[in-house]
Amino acid sequence: MPKIRKKSLVRALGTVTSSVAAAAGVVVAVGQPAQAAVVSATTAPIGGTVRITEPNGFTTATSAPAVLLRPSNETCAIYTTPSSTLVSAESATKVDNSTISFKVPVLPLGTNGVAKAQNVCVYPNAGNGATPIGGTTPVLTAYQSLTSNPSNGLSGVTNNLTLNSATPIFTGVTTPAALFTQNPCPAGYGVSAGNIPAPVIKAGLANSAATVAVPSAVIGSGSFNTCVYQGSTTNDPLLGASTYQVTLPQLSLSANSGPYDAVNNITANSGATSLFSGIAAPGVLFTPNAGCPANYDTTVAGSVAVPASGIRKLANNRLGITVPKLAITDKQPKVYQLCTYTGSSGESTVLGSAPYTSTVLPNPTSITPNAGPTTGGITITVNGTDFPTTPGSISATLGGVDLLNVTPVNPTSFTATLPLRTAGDNAALVVNTLAGSRTLPGAFSFRNALKILGTNTAPATSAATDVLVQGTDFLSQVFGTSADGAKIYLVRGEYDPTVDENNNKANGPLAECTNPFVLSDTELVCTLKLNRRLDKTGVLADVLGATKSLTSDIGTRLGSRLITSLGNKFSLDDIGRVLTGSGNGNTIPAGSTIQAVLTPGLALISQPATGTTTLQSLLSGIVGDVLKATTGGVGVLTTAGSNVVTASGTTFSKSDVGRVLKDVTGIVSGTTISAVLPGGTSAVLSAPATASTTGGTPIKITSTLLGSNLVSGDFSVGDAGAVFGQNSAGIPVGSRITQLTNNNTTAEISQAATSTFNNLVTGTPAAVDRPVGLTLLPNLAVPDGAYNLTLVSNGAPGASTTSADYKQTALTSGSIFTVSPF
């Protein structure tokens, strides 16, 4: 191949915009014989910017001078209005006293659209009569802009182009010629360094098309001008021009990157093209620029030559190359171009190229924290040295799973989001960069854990709260009702199934998330029942169980809710139970419940103490006493089979929801109040009543007196508190018997009679309802607080935690469930 000297890879058209030129369809060539004014480029496209320079030649020009283009046979006369043959340049601007710039307008063409010379005339302004300024007039020659098909090709590869003109520029031309150059097209034909000749053949009969064979000497990369002339004789005139984009063949490398501080053997492959055919000793350069020099040139700043010993021709399309040490800055990746040549001399021409990145091998040393949940989602920091800092330059795996959201921080650390993974210790970290990979064994432990995805708080009154849970290995768990089945527990802290002699778990659950619905191996939903907690054995706490007596044991302080137990007799099972104090001037308000047990000797009650005790005046008390009890007909009316009860002589409140009924006639002990209806006169029970207390045996009334609350009749002890219904004795409906007197022959009623009735012999029956007394205990709900949602593969008391089959999730921030009224 002939020698091609290195030229700029950007088309040298001064400040001209080639895309504008192509759109305009006409290009101008500027030539100046010996004259004072100098133009910025020898050619310029229509729409491109040209500068005329003459030292201090334009001092009289205004900020908006004028430029007229006249036929070359006309001199620059005074300024006159532009016409079809007298064209005004666009955007004429005074740059300074020595420079005028303008945009080349569309110019009239010669016969058949061939070149036509124009004089460039400069005026101080666009006023009629203005005289020209500046030195000798430069001359512009307009020529056709041709279209090329194809308009691009590979470096050093012959290619046939079809050129088309909008006018018959080849009329009368028998042997046109072409030059390929990365410089502006010369106005006249001439072969010289950088101007590569090519044959042209007219095509068709319209004299507006021709074919050009791109010579193999067109090498390198960038834009070449295809300049077409009337012939191949020196100074034959230019007819038209097009552009041809040249690219280097891209090589495929076996490794696109490597360490900066070590040599690295790779292969370069040109695929189906035998790029290295006939080349015995190819040359290779690494350059820090985006492109390759057209000729082998080791003087390019930052370039590194591969010695002959580091280049091996393996086939006509494949080289073996030893990559030398390639410098980087601040230990950050740097992209080089691998450039291959026909040899290693200045005459050698470029063949193909590929980008290659020089970088540093990462060196991870630790992970903070070094353990995390199998549910992932937490941010970890990888520490070490030699990490690249460019976004996207690092990837990593932990235990074989990709780290998420990898973000470089600095050369000594990057952050990432922990992925979802099965449990296991000693997971290896693998850090990947362009330089390669490094492994840190035993870097991390994945701890079995659950992560609550949706609702993570609910009040203690909730009987059913669905919880969406993320974890691992759900499909392998055997959930069920048996004690040794897999369970999801709500635990205070870490679950411990170890049992004592009473089968109490060391740290058992307070609630179970029941009915697990497995959505996938990593997701399920279950239901928490918070209004009834579990006891230490893992079964529902016995609300109706035996009470606990504390004798001369309880200490109080006026105004404080903290109480003490001298004998350390408080336990977590006492939470929620009623504490009734007695003896020595009781200072515990009635109805107080134990809300928290801080230590066996210290508890918190629901109401502040009314006084202070001393060591000699410690109180006795009962834990588990009733919260509320009514007698004397004050209570509820029931209907067998109905869940709704009606208050009589009392009312329900919202605080009664969840409370437990005990020893109430017609209601099974342990039944709870599910809801209180508006007004508080009725409530809904968790189970229907088993007997009715309405519509009982009527009472025989013998006499009443208008306006009197005393009635006579046949009463029994059980009639106290009875409520009257319809009757003919003048007793108001809803009136209650408040007291029996005279051996149950008279009674006091809550409302005075509205009429007088007297029949001592037969009397009259009065319908009554007989309310039953109400005894309420607080339901033992899960106390307010933060808990750990834990999955265990075996929920039985005393389950072996060392068994290979046993699994238990750890306490993490994602597994926290809060019981709170808010």
Image: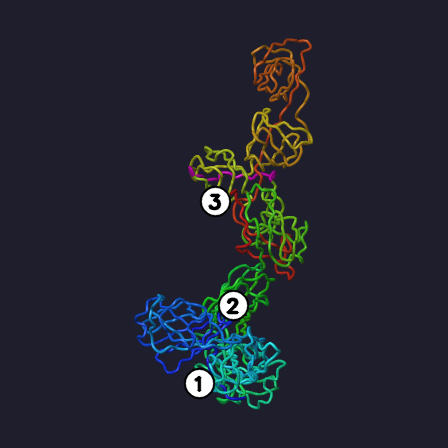
Where is residue 205, by image quadrant? bottom right
The residue indicated by pointer 1 is 299
Give the colouring mode of the picture. rainbow
Which labelled disc corresponds to residue 392? Answer: 2
Residue range in magenta is 543-559
Q: Residues within 10 Å of mark 1 (few under 14, many from 20)?
A: few
Which labelled disc corresponds to residue 712? Answer: none
Question: Mark 1 falls on what kind of element?
Answer: loop
In the image, is residue 573 part of the stretch drawn in magenta?
no
Amino acid on which the number 1 mark rests in the picture = Thr
Where is residue 713, by image quadrant? top right
The residue indicated by pointer 3 is 602
Amino acid on which the number 2 mark rests in the picture = Gly
Question: Mark 3 falls on what kind of element?
Answer: strand
Q: Quadrant of the N terminus?
A: bottom right
Image marks 3 and 2: residues in contact by CB distance under 8 Å: no
Question: Mark 2 falls on what kind of element?
Answer: loop
Which sits in the foreground, 449 or 47? Answer: 47
Q: Using the numbered discs, state the Cα–Cα distance from disc 3 to disc 2 in whole angstroms.
A: 57 Å
